[in-house]
Image: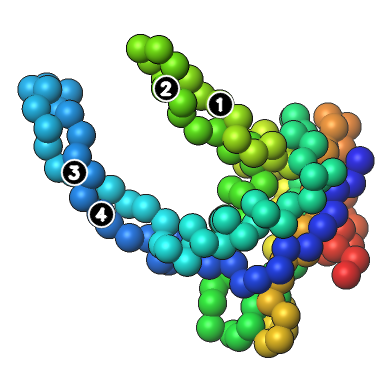
């Protein structure tokens, strides 16, 4: 099964634009409320995530299990951004939220993903392109079976053949 689709818009870098914000937590030792620094994604990265979640086609949300390979060709509007697929890979996984139930909290699936977790990605082919008028990411996801995992390590064919567009 091959899952293929395009997300429109320019991805924001997840790595180079993180922001440090204060977060109040209860100290494990004393139990009192203390402020600790926390790293969060930039506003641009969070906005891009919202855009991606709206654009992933329902039929692509297969929640694949087991190892997968991913090929992404990202067209940026300029040469300036670094090639960074991490925010896209995050957006393709299941999304959960914590919901209060009685006295505790329960993890609830909010968005079905193409795969369950981006830790399943065992092969990546990431390509950089420029399209000043139409930045986008063309994504191909395929499950890898045990036999394919062994062949992938031995295969000497062109790794870029996975992306045809």
Q: Residue at 85% of width from left, 54% of height from top?
A: 4
Disc 4, SS: strand
Graded by Cα atoms within 10 Å as few (under 14), some (14 to 19) or many (20 or more), the crowding at tag 2 reads few
Residue under the image location 91 percent in, 41 percent down: 1
Q: Is mark 2 on a helix, strand or loop?
A: strand
Query: Looking at the image, which residue is at 62% across and 60% down?
Result: 51
Q: Check residue 36 in the rendering and tell me which mark sits there, or answer none.
A: 3
Say above or below: 86 vs 13.
above
Does residue 81 appear to the left or right of 71 in the view shown?
Answer: left
Label whose residue precedes the other's in the sequence (1 or 3): 3
Residue where numbered disc 2 is placed: 100
In space, the residues marked 2 and 4 are separated at their CA atoms by 25 Å
Which residue corresponds to mark 1? 108
Report which residue position mark 4 lands on.
21
Q: Which tag is nearer the camera, tag 4 or tag 1?
A: 1
The image quadrant that residue 85 belongs to is: bottom right
Mark 2 vs mark 1, CA separation in Å: 10 Å
Neighbour tally class for label 3: few under 14, some 14-19, many 20 plus, Cα within 10 Å = few
- Can you give x and y, in whole percent of width and height, for residue 146 in the image? 83, 29
Indicate the position of residue 151 as horizontal and vertical percent values: 87, 41
């Amino acid at each position: 099964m091959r899952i293929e689709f395009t997300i429109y818009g320019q991805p924001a870098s997840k790595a180079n634009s993180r922001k440090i914000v204060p977060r109040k937590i209860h100290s494990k030792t004393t139990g009192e409320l203390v402020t600790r620094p926390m790293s969060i994604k930039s506003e641009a990265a969070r906005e891009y995530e919202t855009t991606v979640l709206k654009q992933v086609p329902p039929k692509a949300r297969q929640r694949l299990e087991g190892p997968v390979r991913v090929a992404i060709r990202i067209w940026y509007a300029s040469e300036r951004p670094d090639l960074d697929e991490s925010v896209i890979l995050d957006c393709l996984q299941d999304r959960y939220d914590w919901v209060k139930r009685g006295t505790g909290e329960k993890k609830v699936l909010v968005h079905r993903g193409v795969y369950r977790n981006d830790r399943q990605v065992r092969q990546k082919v990431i390509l950089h392109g420029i399209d000043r008028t139409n930045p986008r990411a063309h994504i191909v996801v395929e499950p890898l079976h045990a036999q394919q995992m062994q062949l992938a390590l031995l295969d000497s064919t062109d790794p870029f053949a996975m992306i045809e567009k």
